[in-house]
Amino acid sequence: MASWLSKLMDHAVDAQFRRDPRGRLVFVPFSLKKKCYFVDSKSDEEKIRALVKMYKSANQMMSLLTYPIIVVPGLILERYAEPLPWEYRMRIDIGIPVFFWLVLGGVAWMNWSLYMRAIPSFTSPLAEAGSDVKAGLQPITLRPWRPLLIVCAVCLIFAGLGIFALVARSPICR
């Protein structure tokens, strides 16, 4: 049984593929404004899907790691660095997350550059789709999750604003 993360990555990979009006599969590596390729064989499709899934999975893991890397040093310092002056604690609170954020940014850039270099080798035997074909491309799967994600994002924004308002009105901040 596939995990929910694997299913999410499969939907993300499906977004990179479209069907033309004649039913042929088209791979869209970057955007419809750039080159798109017809995928004729099942083996080529599987190879390209594996590449895109590896790229998207690595990006998702980096996104999930960013929040703890930024928050955990601040929480540790809040507990154990109380004797230090406020200025030193702020420098450490900002410096440690920025360092790890830069490291993750470098890894994300490396991941992107590897993907950019791998695409030409995977698509070299494939025929390029013309601009007339790009205009009529249809997504393979519908995105039923989009309204749910929008509602969740709006709820999170309102919850964040509510927490901010509560903290701003607390007597500790005054």
Image: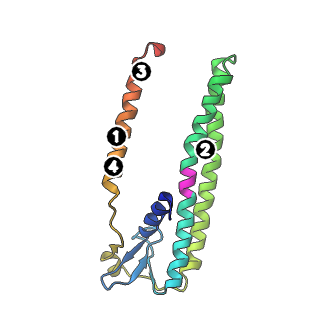
Q: Residues within 10 Å of mark 2 (few under 14, many from 20)?
A: some
Horizontally, is 110 left or right of 33 in the view?
A: right
Residue at label 2? 101
Q: Secondary structure at mark 1?
A: helix
Mark 2 vs mark 3, foreground winner is: 3
Q: CA distance from mark 2 to mark 1?
A: 26 Å
- What is the quadrant of residue 144 in the picture? bottom left
Which of the two marks, 3 or 1, is nearer to us in this view?
1
**The residue stretch that appears in magenta:** 59-63
Q: Disc 4 to disc 2, how far (Cα)?
A: 26 Å
Question: Mark 2 or mark 1: which is in front?
Answer: 1
Quadrant showing the C terminus: top left
Q: Amino acid at mark 1?
A: Cys
Residue that numbered label 4 is attached to: 150
Count of numbered badges drawn on the protein: 4
Q: Is residue 73 above or below residue 141?
A: above
Q: Earlier in the sequence, mark 3 or mark 1?
A: 1
The image shows residue 90 at horizontal and vertical percentages of 62, 26
